[in-house]
Image (tube, rainbow, N blue to C red):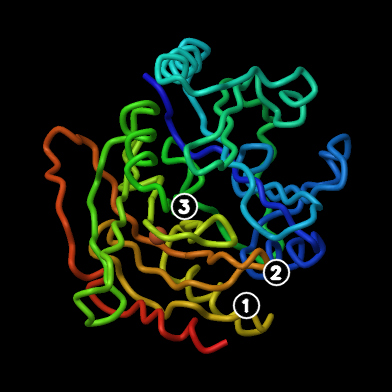
Amino acid sequence: MTINSLGYLGVSSTNIEEWRDFGTAVLGLQDVSQSMADCGDTVFLKMDEQPFRLLVQAGGGDHLNLIGWETVSEQALQNVSERLTAAGTAWEWGSPELCAARRVQSLIAFKDPSGMQHEAFWGRISDFAVFNSPVGVAGFVTGDQGMGHVVLPAAQFDEMTTFFTEVLGFGLSDLMKLRFTPDPEEPIKRLWFMHCNRRHHSLGLFEMPMPAQCVHLMLEVRNIDEVGRCNDRRIQAGTPLTGTLGRHCNDHMVSFYMRSPAGFDIEYGAEGRTIDDWSRYAVFESTAASYWGHDFSVGQTD
Ligand SMILES: [Fe+2]
């Protein structure tokens, strides 16, 4: 037993107020920064009964800077630390102050082969206050499926896929091999989707460098109407659309993509599929991202 779900995400921002507005007015998350006031110059955004899922820290750049993974128990976290040690990956215990700031019993911190910072934790501390969206989002699909999925740039693709499958215990869900031009000389970019619970994928690895250190973060709401209402709010706020509405072939998510203030995309979707028995699931390669829609050329124009 190792990683159980995507727990929280940390973003570095040169303008945390822009994130506060985007997170609340467009995404519909709840700003709980006041109740986390002991944690410094940070915007905390809540999307379910967990104390927060997104933390945006004032910093010198705009990019993803932290991924927090939930384990189910102290023993599971111990297993993660032992696997990191066996793989020769350096890790350290989070200080009591850091564990208090993350609202967890304990955590370990380590870097993946691309240098991204990760934390794995057990025992989230929550007051179970009801999620109260400022724009009336009824709720997000989280729980044992975690906060959604994140797709990371993985220029060192073989090292990254080995790290996440063999060390952290993720399973491959499906894969793609992409070229952006008809030129057969263009190198193929691999894109792997991986699971750690019944959500079709919690992690994607894309064989491309990205300055924002993230390709996209997906948040799932309970129905298509919630997706449409978010698109209305996106238009109202002037947030750039980066991928039109569509349904993915792999996780069946109906979603659209928009540009976050950090430069990476947020996918906002509904109807994602879950897999209850991975032993009966056959891994596949798809040559198209979507059954319909998801025109990403709209994001190339701005
Ligand atoms: Fe996605």
Q: Is residue 75 above or below residue 62?
A: above
Name the one closer to the observer, 25 or 22: 22
Query: Element under label 2?
Result: helix
Q: How many marks?
A: 3
Split into 4 quadrants, where in the image is the C terminus? bottom right
Q: Disc 2 marks which residue?
A: 25
In the image, which disc is placed on residue 166? none
Task: Decide if residue 280 is on the left or right side of residue 296.
Answer: left
Q: Is residue 245 above or below residue 136?
A: below
Query: Element under label 3?
Result: strand
- Residue visible at 78% across and 51% down in the picture: 43
- Residue visible at 37% across and 82% down in the picture: 295
Question: Dot 1: few (<14), some (14–19), or many (≥20) neighbours within 10 Å?
Answer: some
In the image, which disc is placed on residue 233? 1
**Disc 2 versus disc 3: distance between alpha carbons?**
26 Å
Q: Quadrant of residue 161?
A: top left
Residue 150 spot, x, y in % from top left = 47, 51
**Disc 1 versus disc 3: distance between alpha carbons?**
26 Å
Residue 236 spot, x, y in % from top left = 66, 84
Residue 215 spot, x, y in % from top left = 48, 61
Question: Dot 2: few (<14), some (14–19), or many (≥20) neighbours within 10 Å?
Answer: some
Q: N-terminal of the two: label 2 or label 3?
A: 2
**Disc 1 versus disc 2: distance between alpha carbons?**
7 Å
Q: N-terminal of the two: label 1 or label 3?
A: 3
Amino acid bearing label 3: Leu
Amino acid bearing label 1: Arg
Name the one closer to the observer, 285 or 159: 159
In the image, which disc is placed on residue 152? 3
Query: Element under label 1?
Result: helix
Question: Dot 3: few (<14), some (14–19), or many (≥20) neighbours within 10 Å?
Answer: many
For marks 1 and 3, give the one nearer the viewer: 3
Residue 16 spot, x, y in % from top left = 80, 59
